[in-house]
Amino acid sequence: MRRIITFGTFDVLHVGHVRILKRAKAHGDHLTVGLSSDELNFSKKGRNPIYSFDARLELLSSLRFVDDVFKEESLEQKREYIIKHKADMLVMGNDWEGRFDEFKDVCEVIYLPRTPSVSTTEIIEIIKEQQ
């Protein structure tokens, strides 16, 4: 069995998220998603996610091509998460190009193109502007 792992916040789940997760799954038999905790998201982005961890977990877990979801609590533990989940490949969006190459010694690392013109940040900004 070929195991794929990816990481993200997946806040305001949108078609870009769905597409990249489907394409990630196409690289193997089992897709595991490391879902950023609310605290980790705040430390990375300086804001809380729109949806709570539990809501984001429920949304991701309901997708038929996502096999497992776990809480990512630390960016510094990515290597340990990859090893613990026995990942053969780490898949990330190409906006992260090169940033995870350090894990090539424990798994294959690939970067997939993002869906053009779709961004969680842009969606949130559009919503704010309409209020």
Image (tube, rainbow, N blue to C red):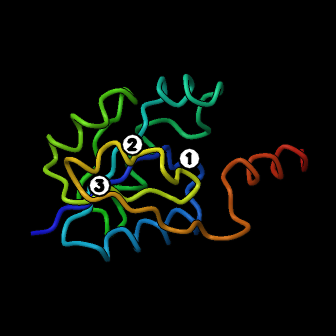
Q: Nearer the viewer, residue 93 or 98?
A: 98
Mark 2 is surrounded, within 10 Å at the Cα level, by few (under 14), some (14 to 19) or many (20 or more) other residues, namely many
Location of the N terminus (image quadrant): bottom left
Give coordinates of residue 63: x percent, y percent. 37, 66
Q: CA distance from mark 2 to mark 3?
A: 11 Å
Farthest-out residue, left: 1
Q: Name the secondary structure under disc 3.
A: strand
Q: Quadrant of residue 13?
A: bottom right
Mark 3 is surrounded, within 10 Å at the Cα level, by few (under 14), some (14 to 19) or many (20 or more) other residues, namely many
Q: Nearer the viewer, mark 3 or mark 1?
A: 3
Q: Residue at x 24, y 54 (%)?
A: 68
Which label number is shown at residue 11? 1
Relative to 73, residue 118 above or below: below
Q: Residue at x 31, y 36 (%)?
A: 78
Residue type of the residue flagged with mark 2: Leu
Please tell me which of labels 1 and 2 falls first in the chain: 1
Please tell me which of labels 3 and 1 falls first in the chain: 3
Relative to 90, residue 78 above or below: above
Q: Look at the numbered discs 1 and 2 and tell me whether their residues touch, using CB distance below 8 Å.
A: no
Q: Name the secondary structure under disc 2.
A: strand
Location of the C terminus (image quadrant): top right
Which label number is shown at residue 35? 2
Q: Residue at x 28, y 42 (%)?
A: 70
Q: Nearer the viewer, mark 2 or mark 3?
A: 3
Q: Residue at x 38, y 48 (%)?
A: 101
Please tell me which of labels 2 and 3 falls first in the chain: 3
**What residue sits right under mark 3 in the picture?**
5
